[in-house]
Amino acid sequence: MKAFVHDHGNLLIKDMNDPVAGDGEVVVAIHAAGLNHRDLFIPNRRGNDAQALVIGSDGAGVIESVGAGVEQFSVGDEVIINPGLRWYENSVAPPKEFDILGMPDDGTFAERIVLSAEQVEHKPSHLSWDEAGVLALSALTGYRALFTKGELKVGETVFIPGAGSGVATYLIAFAKQKGARVIVTSRSEQKRDHAKKIGADIALDTASDWPEELKDETIDLVIDSVGRATFNRSLEVLKKGGRIVIFGSSTEDTVELNLRDFFYGQYQLIGSTMGCREELRDMLKFIEDHNIHPVVDKSFTLDQANEAMDYLEQGKQFGKIAIRVRD
């Protein structure tokens, strides 16, 4: 089969062995996969001596074969892949055996993938292949951060720095369907306009004076994945006793925090990572009930995977980037 791999320091298309389903496993013929920032970091994390690894965490396709003992799926079923490995029930943190598909295990940027039947779910029928292929990792991350950890309630206001990321587009959609008020930021006027079109109530220029712009707003919850560049600015606009959920850091990981201001403000700082299968299933039902469609900025073919990586690294996208493996 054809696959996009990291092989001895290089990212390239390579012929790999076709996978075979063992006991409890399924082989999925991938129709579309989703690109994530995690994929950009893999070459540096693996080094130049590592053997070929198929990258990619998100994907959707059709069950091509099933191993012994698999009863919940049949050949021909349309499915999405759960990229969060071995985390099945909701818990305050992932179990020790939790990992993310696409490193160290072979991922989704290939014509086929074999994995445990526990790691696939039926594809929502209202989604296209590109939409289904980019769904799971970002949408699950946003769902857990917003609802499980952030405990967003009807009528609250959520503040989301960085409006153009894939997770941010899901956060906007989920929060609006919950009945919340949504405020986002972006340096790009085009991305601010896009954010309003998909439901954001206010879209601020990242460089603006946030406390002045939001002096008439009450921010109940902040969902921040930018890191040092926005953490203290986000905290400054959060109401006393408010909640701030961090699920990533696209800028520097470390921040300076005035502890006295923090404890006097009675703020709640909460970490979040991906999500479990229970939450994934809840999220899939939520998007079906509300007819939510992922925002796909651009689609590339598997042969164009390097171009897709470059496009993501430039940060021009609004929403998700799909890798189309089959028409």
Image (cartoon, helix red, strand yellow):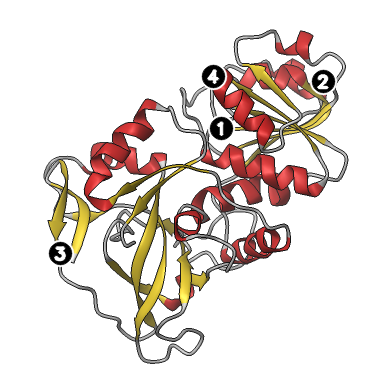
Instruction: Name the residue at 21% across, 58% down.
Output: 3
Image depth: mark 2 or mark 3 in front: 3
Q: Report the Cα–Cα distance between label 1 and label 4.
A: 17 Å
Q: Quadrant of the N terminus?
A: bottom left
Instruction: Name the residue at 37% across, 63% down.
Output: 31
Instruction: Name the residue at 59% across, 37% down.
Output: 168
Location of mark 4 (residue): 188
Image depth: mark 3 or mark 4 in front: 4
- Which one is in front, 183 or 146? 183
Location of mark 2 (residue): 264
Task: Return the disc, 1 or 4, that comes first in the chain's sequence.
Answer: 4
Task: Return the disc, 1 or 3, that comes first in the chain's sequence.
Answer: 3
Q: Amino acid at mark 1?
A: Ser
Residue 155 in the figure: left or right of residue 93: right
Question: Badge 1: how crowded within 10 Å, few (<14), some, or many (20+)?
Answer: many
Q: Name the mark on residue 37.
A: none
Instruction: Name the residue at 27% across, 45% down.
Output: 305
Whether residue 193 is visible, yes or no, is yes
Q: Report the Cα–Cα distance between label 3 and label 4.
A: 41 Å
Question: Badge 2: how crowded within 10 Å, few (<14), some, or many (20+)?
Answer: few
- Disc 1, disc 3: CB below 8 Å? no
Location of mark 1 (residue): 225
Q: Report the Cα–Cα distance between label 2 and label 1.
A: 24 Å
